[in-house]
Amino acid sequence: MRIAAPAACMPRWPHSALPAELAPATARLRSHLLDLIRPDGTLHSPCRSRVLESALLLALLDRIRLEPAARSRLAAYLSLHCNSPEPLDRLMARAALHHRPDPAGLLDVKQFLARAPDFTGPRKRALLHAVLTLLDAAPADDEIPAAPEAFSLHGLHTWARVQVTAVKAVLAQAHGHRLIDEDDLELLRSTLRPGTVWEANLLIHLSVLHALLPVPGQYPLVVEGVKTALRHQRPDGGMPFICDEDTWVTATAGVALHAAGAAAPVMDLIARRLVALQHPAGGWSYTDGVQLPDVDCTSVAVEVLHLAGPATYRAPLRRALRALHALRGKDGGFPTYLTGAPSEACMTAAAANALSTQGPAYHREFESALSYIASRQRPDGSFPPDWSSSRLHTVSRAVLAASRHPRRGPDSPAQHIIRKAVTLVADCQNADGGWGQQDGDASDALSTAYALTALTTQSIPGPATRGAAYLITQQRSDGSIASIPDSIGPRPFGFTVPALADVFTLLALGHLTRRLEPAPCRISQVTNADKGEGVIRSSPARHRPARRPSLNAASEVAVEERGQVWRTPWLAGGHPVRPHQAAGKPTGLHTHQ
């Protein structure tokens, strides 16, 4: 996802081609993100409450008749979603509160499950059936039957094994079958520790509690599990899907902040935090304390360490690349979690972007990844469902990966990927300048950010200009970006991580800015931004001047000019940009031109 030096054949865009408000809006957004970074380098952005987990916990409290105060808060949260525009949320909220179903908005099961990859279909159908069964909302005609393959544990990662086992127990109880065998019981019980949510996943935690409650002798364990879950009840009364995904958000923010000209100490801080969170085998998980690594987190972390300094972080980079290589499928693609699992276009694009940092060393793997991505691209330029509600998420990451191919001939897989993807983006731009998650959907900031990132590989600025103007209208007074939920987990259930709209918007604006003509100021040029040199030094500890100010929350110097405070980056030589050098412009974005 990182920014590379613009190709020589790509024309620079004049500053007048983009909205005049772009620079100050980007500066406000960058400052907002910097202020979110903790002293240890983590960008903390807790997941918001979700109807699914909130309804499951309310149903559990009704079954064990405990925690009346917590139940009241859950009920108050769910009551706000009884008329949700999302049919499944509306159905679950009403069912949990024992309200009558809404006859005007029935759930289209087939359409809902189509948001998940085909290879997950039987398991997701069974999960949906189990959830609705627990809420006494399952269709009477068994509209969501569970196929036998939905309960096979073969080839599944640990989370899926536990979830499938819990679902099997719930559905068996509903049909009067044997609830659980000794192996199943041991697996479910192994995830419950007082005070700890296993793998930080509240959905699995609550599913396990529901599965164990009817089993003789498990009631005390369930009660303790409920107390653990309630430690994560949000101020609005609801429950989240996962506690947070701070590692992935932090890594992605690192790439975005680099794109927007953040100072070297910021990159150092984030990189050091990522190194501390790296698993011994080389990968990363979505948050601290989670044992299962994934391709997405590992790939983005590789890009951050590369940007912060390939020499400084040579050892962790080597381990991470070995971990990625071990996950590579025979088809050249990459799965999300386990070797041998089906490859996915989005994960393969993530891995390809990471592999592209290594030049010839991983050229064969990079080429194979692009060929796989091209094979999965649909005629309209989109890809199969991934971990985002927006079809443009994989599109943007695939375009960035393909744009890094050193030889993009007219008939190469890389050029085919770019041509089809950009045609899709150009064709689905809305009248307000933004893009929606799917064809015909209203514009949202995250989908627009993905589209803009893809468009920065093109020659004409017109569509990008309109998209940037739309994004600016979505900025709040504190610099953050308003957007609808985008993340999915488990697929196809959506959830919200507030900071992601800020992160991907800043990334898109950074990509836009690198296409601009050089600014008329005395800021050193970034001659090799893709290797982390220039503004972001490859080995900052060796070159940093002795009297540089200590790292503060924003990791930059605040200067006041014309009554406004802006964040100012350090130049490659160790000196801050002075107001007169920036010609009155309140951002350091021009350092990447």
Image (cartoon, grey):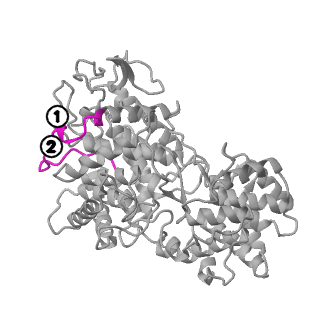
From the viewer's perspective, tell me whether residue 105 is left or right of residue 534: right
Q: Position of residue 38 (x, y in %)?
A: 52, 32
Q: Is residue 409 magenta?
A: no
From the viewer's perspective, tell me whether residue 479 is left or right of residue 178: left
Foreground residue among 183 and 85: 85
Q: In the rendered view of the protein, which quadrant contains the C terminus?
A: top left
Q: Tell me which amino acid carries mark 1.
A: Pro
Residue drawn at the location 14% of the way across and 66% of the way down: 410
Reading the image, the residue beneath label 2 is 12
Reading the image, the residue beneath label 1 is 518
Foreground residue among 425 and 173: 425
Helix, strand or loop at mark 1:
loop
Q: Tell me which amino acid carries mark 2.
A: Arg
Mark 1 or mark 2: name the one nearer the start of the chain. 2
Q: Total marks drawn?
A: 2
Q: Residue furthest right?
A: 217
Helix, strand or loop at mark 2:
loop
Residue segment shown in magenta: 1-23
Residue drawn at the location 32% of the way across and 60% of the way down: 398
Q: Is residue 194 visible?
A: no
Q: Position of residue 294 (x, y in %)?
A: 49, 57
Q: Is residue 19 magenta?
A: yes
Q: Is residue 467 visible?
A: yes
Foreground residue among 373 and 395: 395
The reply to whether dot 1 and dot 2 touch (C-beta < 8 Å) is yes
Against 217, residue 576 (above or below) is: above
Q: Position of residue 543 (x, y in %)?
A: 32, 25
Q: Residues within 10 Å of mark 1 (few under 14, many from 20)?
A: some
Q: CA distance from mark 1 to mark 2?
A: 8 Å
Q: Position of residue 563 (x, y in %)?
A: 35, 17
From the viewer's perspective, tell me whether residue 227 is left or right of residue 119: right
